[in-house]
Amino acid sequence: MDESKRSFLKRAAGLLAASGLVAGGAKRADAVEPPDVAPSMKAPGAGMSEYGSPAKYEVKVTRTGIRSQPGTTGSGASRAPLESLDGMLTPSGLHFERHHSGVPDIDPATHRLLIHGLVKRPLIFSVNALLRYPMVSRIHFLECSGNSQVLYQPAPPNLTAGQTHGLVSCSEWTGVPLRLLLEEAGVDRGAPWILAEGADAAAMSRSIPMAKAMDDAILALFQNGERLRPENGYPVRLFLPGWEGNMSVKWLRRLKVVSAPIMTKDETSRYTDLQSDGKSLMFTYPMEVKSVITRPSHGMTLAGAGLHQISGIAWSGNGTITKVEVSTDSGRTWVDAPLVAPVLPRALTRFRLPWKWDGAATVLKSRATDDTGAVQPERAKFIAEHGNNAVFHFHGIQAWSVATSGEVKHVYA
Amino acid sequence: MDESKRSFLKRAAGLLAASGLVAGGAKRADAVEPPDVAPSMKAPGAGMSEYGSPAKYEVKVTRTGIRSQPGTTGSGASRAPLESLDGMLTPSGLHFERHHSGVPDIDPATHRLLIHGLVKRPLIFSVNALLRYPMVSRIHFLECSGNSQVLYQPAPPNLTAGQTHGLVSCSEWTGVPLRLLLEEAGVDRGAPWILAEGADAAAMSRSIPMAKAMDDAILALFQNGERLRPENGYPVRLFLPGWEGNMSVKWLRRLKVVSAPIMTKDETSRYTDLQSDGKSLMFTYPMEVKSVITRPSHGMTLAGAGLHQISGIAWSGNGTITKVEVSTDSGRTWVDAPLVAPVLPRALTRFRLPWKWDGAATVLKSRATDDTGAVQPERAKFIAEHGNNAVFHFHGIQAWSVATSGEVKHVYA
């Protein structure tokens, strides 16, 4: 057992002792006999299955806040139910969605990816051809730049953690380093941009800087061990670690090496950030350092004073989370919450802190720091700097109030 | 970009160059125009969904080798289709199954876990009570001790990698350290054993050494971010990192601290290893160092000479994988295959090696080493030492033959 584990257990055990026995709400069972045979033991259970599903008792744990543009069914988003999840990974079935014209039905046998433009040898790849190339695997978060956009609003929304922050998810992505294919095509290394185009009805398109393409960009074919899910770009998507989600173009059909950004509809009509001075920021790629407490969070009710666990996630598109501080007294004092290993660059990082609630009303907050030294700002400071005209890149501190009744609500504090 | 990545890309690029251009099977596309609008771009796609599923084109990627005891539907196993997966994680829907009397239907609202026996304060926990305790998350493999048992047979089986090795999977497990609850119950630290009992119709039961329970055992509540799947012990299972899967008792209802192993039916009628000298090994807990090449593997046909990617998994219940050697010339020479980060203790570790196939018949093998210095043995050596009466703990080297036709088959070599 390593020292960090020993220290965690010691702290946890100390808290349990300080909380009195049976702190977690377990019942004393002195002189208890083994319970009667449970109903589930009286007859054989269900058989094996070809592909499993969650328990029927978890049927309410679904993507949440599903919203589409008026008149459409697939131009919108769905959110991961963060308040029901724990750990660093997001099950693929609950990974958030953001589509510009729905989820296309693409037969991998006929799908092709073209690399052309400022290259010596334009190339067309089938999916089977891509599967023969050397691959890498990386655990990374993906966040829609519009995540938490309701927090630009003047009044705190009456929404859960998933509804406000659930446009972020974390998966293991496996695929071919884009650099290999660009080099095979004889890319003009002086060309500064690449147009990436999806095979959806929106032909979702973004201009990608060459430096990112040659650094850590991958053409992802697998997600969490199996082939990509349709809503995540099956059969192949671009994946740009740490950058706003829309740039990781799904259902990728074309990469054109070009000498200037293409200024597609997707980077002019949206994905620019209108500031309070009336100017707009463009090409704001990395998602900033951010965190949110997922439990307890809005919509939950604490069962009573005593031991509770604070659990949350932190992430940064610019690097690795180095610290998450938690305040259980409305921001007066902060303590470092242990981070759950492995702490990986550009991945969700779980933090947890045992908390003895004394039953008084309070506010819970978390504040993340990354290895560039960037610190997640208070919401008021963030809004003061950026205004609230924008809808993208909100990453201010999230506050949850706890009432004496145990009710947890979204507050600006 | 760190050095290991640079080195990987350099090696991969070198191999591509050595293989000639367009080595992965891509087509030259000189003077090509962007392809016509794909069919998927002509109409909006499907809408968002509450819980996603794999693409319909992947419908054949299912658990495999589903077998049950005669006259039962749920006393048997299903296997993860390793040959179709990549990365280190197994999607929960494809995680292998091994049940002794099917998957019980357990309502988490009424399920209880009893801790009793040699403790000061017997305790009963509801699932909601468990959820209030401090938790840990860890990425670990789980392997059935009967994995690869067909390889004890004298003739090589005509089976895929999943069918022979698919009783292993890897997930992120989140739950409460068992030590915390045992200490809360006032466990007698001198008591050497704990009986763990499941709430299935088999009342699956094993005796667990106290040292393991107090070290890294957890009561798992979450798997890959969401609550446990039914076939993996919903709502709560024991999880013993690195040890044979059946000891991580699913649907856990009872832990009784005892002074001697209970010798339950599950550790007398099975889960002992009959050796060639007629003696049996009992309580053989850790799963030994092992690896298998998942692509290419039995049942696949290489599309032709040129660049291919060798991809496989390695694991050890005794620690961390430190090396995987691959031979592409029937075991004459071996090269170290790069391991995919993060390389975690008692987790599946992906290895990959670009391979230029010259079109001649050959045999592929992989050989894993862990940080205790243990090396995966050749099958012949393993059988010579252990005989082939046993059905558990096979971990010999796996060989795949490649014919000039490209056909890949299971061989003993």
Image (cartoon, coloured by chain):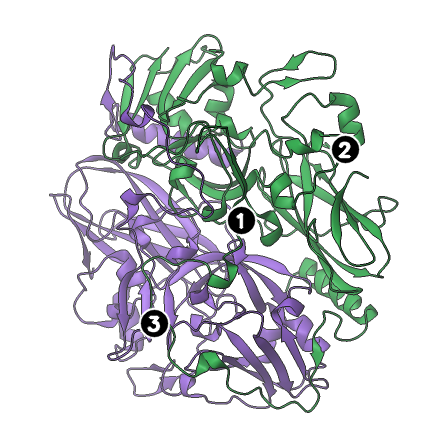
Chain colours: A green, B purple
Q: Pointer 2 indicates a residue of which chain?
A: A
What's the residue at 69%, 36% (across, down)? A370
Q: Pointer 3 indicates a residue of which chain?
A: B
What's the residue at 58%, 37% (across, down)? A346
Give the Cα separation between the discs numbered 3 and 2: 55 Å
Residue A304 picture quarter:
bottom right
Q: Which residue is identified by label 3?
A: B146
Q: Is there any visible trace of residue B373 in the rendered image? A: no
Q: Which residue is identified by label 1?
A: A89
Instruction: Tell me the mark number nearer the camera, choosing from 3 and 2.
Output: 2
What's the residue at 29%, 78% (across, down)? B72
Give the Cα separation between the discs numbered 1 and 3: 29 Å
Q: Which residue is identified by label 2?
A: A379
Q: Amino acid at mark 1?
A: Leu
Tag of residue B121: none
Q: Is residue A170 left or right of residue B274?
A: right
Q: Is there any visible trace of residue B19 in the rendered image? A: yes
- How packed is label 3: few (under 14 Cα within 10 Å), some, or many (20 or more)? many
